[in-house]
Image (cartoon, rainbow, N blue to C red):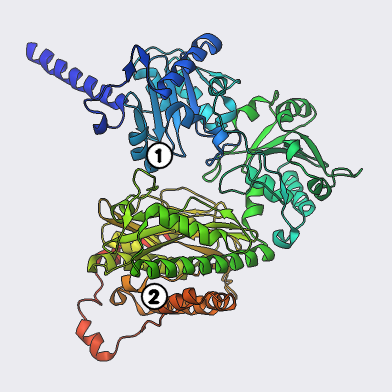
């Protein structure tokens, strides 16, 4: 019996140790031996700790709560937000895009995704616990079991998706905790000094010349969709949907041409809630606000919640955007504004309207990619020429040069994402973002991974290329070629219309799987469309003709280098493809930027893959080459011509026989990948 007691004691001690470690978070080696709080002359000499102290005063005296949850969202649940809304950064010092923060009266923790774990470890003080999102412990687990007694938990419902709020409420309740709505944001209450001003740019009309459809027509199509859902009205909270629907653009969010607004759409009227100071006479004329039969009524931004309460008294049912794999849906505050049970949760119909480009939009995307490719050809020609002449570049200086060339392009309206330049070992980090602290000197001894993109009047671009200024190793060439083969196979794919995107993902990953490798992110994402390519994502929304999305297979070798190649593809219906009433689709490559020939091992490529590469290079020469010559960009033109030379598609018989049995053999891994890919496609 005594022996049994000893065993139980050891087991309990071990489990307790595991439990404690479980709630501590990631191991922070850079914090070992350091004090958690820096104190000088009896005062906390740290702005973050001063802010946390003020926040805890608000929690205790004003909200009467034991814990407060802060998200990285704004009121519209944007992933990218303006500086005015960076509450998570103000209270923590963490500059990553994605964060959930839990503050108790004694402890503080932050959850973020894989992209920003290392950044959080670098930026957060040592008394912060850091956890990975969607892994245990959850916010509720940490608050309920991790450290101290917490009873009342608060959060601002405007900054929390309804689905997330429901999950928190349920999980906290299971542990005896109460989730309370704190409508006056506590971070706003203490952020009174040195807060950036909200963006005050005027809203702009997006011409029908580029939109391809009047906003009145879009409203009519939306109303038909609402009628099919038997809904009297709809609440729109997504800024991209509002900008699309009304053919308007703004500058309130970095890298996204939108403005802060809500909309209520009924069978006869649309109510636009925004800052009236941003509405010019041109916008009034565009929306016909002064006409008696106006279809749009302009209201103050802050009136949305009062109007929902008032109007909902006479509505039978209202469509409120439901969450999906590509959208967070509506905030908890929107749901709380409805006093009666009239909500119909559906994915916003505007998502599908916006995703399926009309002919004008499709042509605009193609033109934008030609201009963008020309700008990138200029960048690469300049880089190679100046490097040979002895100029030096860092990650940040090269990123600045890329931005300069792109922003000087005709119809440019800004960048579509922060330009990322990763050299050498930094390229081995899937989500690396260069900073003044990490800014590496570029040389000719390793790979350079570049991801960038632009916003143009007629389209959006997003492109990744990997280059080498010197002589790549055989291993680097093999890796690069395998990534390229994955992109080519995906680009060549023909498939039935109802096939799920998850099945397509295996085609791009196949060459990596054949080497026993994989990459941690989705193969691609929609550009204004709901589809994503990721076998881990149960996205049930198939591709439709007119969708545009990225394809970006990759390879990362931590501490050494990385490769990513990204093109934008257009979904196209195959002609004469109807079989048993089933339509087939294929892809058109819209990005027209050369690959690096010195990194391509052509012996690893099949004849059809080489033919695709030759056809791709020929199209670059025809379309981008023509643009470069017309605009007298001859350095970029000759650089492009050098990078798009013809590749021999078939080997001479003597060379074929010499390589038979080695290079041309089909390994078991390749067989497995092909079979598994076909299996996923049929799902």
Residue at 78% across, 47% down = 283
Image position, residue 310 (x, y; %): 78, 25
Q: Dot 2: what SS? A: helix
Task: Name the image quarter holding the C terminus.
Answer: bottom left
Q: Are marks 2 and 1 in contact (CB under 8 Å)?
A: no
Hey, which quadrant is residue 110 in on the image? Answer: top left
Q: Dot 1: what SS? A: loop
Q: Residues within 10 Å of mark 1 (few under 14, many from 20)?
A: some
Image position, residue 55 (x, y; %): 48, 18
What's the CA distance linking mark 2 and mark 1? Answer: 36 Å
Query: Which residue reaches farthest left?
Result: 3
Identify the residue position indicated by label 1 in the image.
113
- Could you tell whether 680 is left or right of 185 in the image? left
Task: Name the image quarter holding the N terminus.
Answer: top left
Residue 305 disc label: none
- Could you tell whether 486 is left or right of 351 in the image? left
Residue at 38% across, 78% down = 610
In the image, is residue 569 above or below residue 524?
below
Asked if residue 583 shows in the view, the reply is: no
Image position, residue 114 (x, y; %): 37, 41
Query: Which residue reaches farthest right?
Result: 292
In the image, is residue 535 above or below residue 176?
below
Q: Camera-side residue: 656 or 445?
A: 445
Earlier in the chain: of badge 2 and badge 1, it is: 1
Residue 609 disc label: 2
């Amino acid at each position: 019996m005594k022996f049994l007691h000893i065993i139980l004691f050891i087991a309990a001690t071990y489990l307790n140790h595991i439990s404690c470690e479980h709630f501590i978070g990631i191991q922070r080696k850079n914090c070992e031996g350091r004090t958690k709080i820096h104190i000088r002359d009896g005062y906390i000499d740290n702005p973050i700790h001063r802010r946390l102290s003020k926040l805890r005063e608000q929690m205790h005296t004003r909200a009467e709560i034991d814990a407060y949850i802060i998200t990285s969202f704004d009121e519209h649940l944007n992933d990218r937000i303006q500086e005015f809304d960076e509450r998570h950064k103000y209270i923590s010092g963490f500059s990553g895009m994605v964060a959930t923060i839990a503050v108790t009266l004694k402890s503080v923790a932050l959850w973020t995704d894989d992209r920003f774990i290392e950044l959080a470890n670098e930026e957060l003080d040592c008394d912060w616990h850091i956890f990975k999102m969607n892994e245990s412990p959850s916010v509720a687990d940490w608050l309920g079991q991790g450290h101290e007694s917490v009873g009342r938990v608060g959060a601002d419902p405007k900054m929390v998706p309804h689905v997330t709020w429901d999950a928190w409420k349920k999980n906290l309740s299971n542990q005896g905790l109460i989730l309370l709505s704190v409508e006056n944001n506590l971070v706003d209450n203490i952020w009174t000094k040195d807060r950036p001003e909200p963006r005050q740019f005027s809203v702009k009309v997006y011409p029908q010349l580029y939109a391809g459809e009047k906003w009145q027509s879009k409203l009519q199509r939306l109303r038909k969709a609402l009628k099919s859902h038997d809904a009297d009205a709809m609440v729109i909270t997504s800024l991209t949907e509002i900008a699309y629907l009304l053919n308007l653009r703004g500058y309130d969010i970095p890298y996204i041409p939108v403005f802060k607004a809500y909309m209520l759409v009924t069978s006869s009227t649309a109510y636009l809630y925004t800052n009236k100071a941003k509405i010019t006479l041109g916008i009034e004329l565009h929306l016909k606000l002064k006409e008696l039969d106006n279809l749009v009524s302009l209201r103050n931004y802050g009136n949305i919640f009062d109007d929902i309460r008032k109007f909902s008294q006479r509505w039978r049912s209202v469509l409120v955007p439901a969450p999906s794999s590509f959208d967070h849906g509506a905030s908890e505050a929107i749901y709380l504004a409805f006093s009666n049970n009239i909500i119909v949760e559906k994915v916003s119909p505007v998502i599908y309207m916006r995703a399926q480009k009309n002919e004008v939009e499709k042509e605009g995307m193609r033109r934008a990619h030609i201009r963008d490719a020309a700008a990138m050809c200029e960048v690469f020609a300049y880089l190679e020429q100046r490097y040979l002449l002895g100029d030096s570049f860092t990650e940040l200086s090269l990123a600045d040069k890329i931005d300069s060339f792109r922003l000087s392009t005709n119809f440019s309206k800004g960048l579509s994402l922060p330009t990322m330049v990763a050299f050498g070992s930094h390229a081995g980090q899937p989500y690396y973002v260069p900073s003044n602290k990490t800014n590496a000197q570029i040389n000719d001894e390793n790979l350079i991974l570049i991801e960038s993109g632009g916003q143009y009047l007629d389209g959006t671009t997003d492109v990744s290329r990997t280059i080498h200024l010197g002589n790549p190793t055989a291993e680097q060439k093999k890796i690069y070629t395998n990534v390229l083969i994955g992109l080519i196979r995906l680009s060549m794919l023909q498939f039935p219309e109802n096939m799920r995107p998850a099945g397509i993902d295996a085609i791009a990953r196949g060459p990596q799987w054949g080497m026993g490798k994989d990459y941690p992110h989705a193969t691609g994402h929609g550009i204004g469309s709901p589809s994503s390519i990721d076998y881990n994502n149960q996205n049930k929304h198939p591709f439709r003709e007119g969708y545009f999305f990225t394809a970006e297979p990759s390879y990362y070798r931590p501490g050494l280098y990385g490769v990513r190649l990204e093109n934008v593809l257009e979904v196209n219906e195959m002609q004469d493809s109807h079989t048993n009433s089933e339509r087939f689709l294929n892809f058109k490559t819209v990005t027209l930027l050369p690959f690096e020939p010195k990194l391509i091992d052509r012996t690893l490529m099949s004849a059809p893959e080489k033919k695709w590469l030759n056809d791709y290079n020929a199209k670059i020469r025809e379309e981008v080459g023509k643009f470069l010559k017309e605009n007298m960009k001859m350095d970029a033109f000759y650089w492009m011509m050098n990078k798009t030379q013809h590749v021999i598609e078939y080997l001479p018989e003597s060379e074929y026989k010499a390589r038979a049995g080695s290079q041309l053999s089909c390994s078991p891994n390749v067989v497995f990948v092909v079979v598994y890919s076909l299996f996923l496609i049929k799902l």
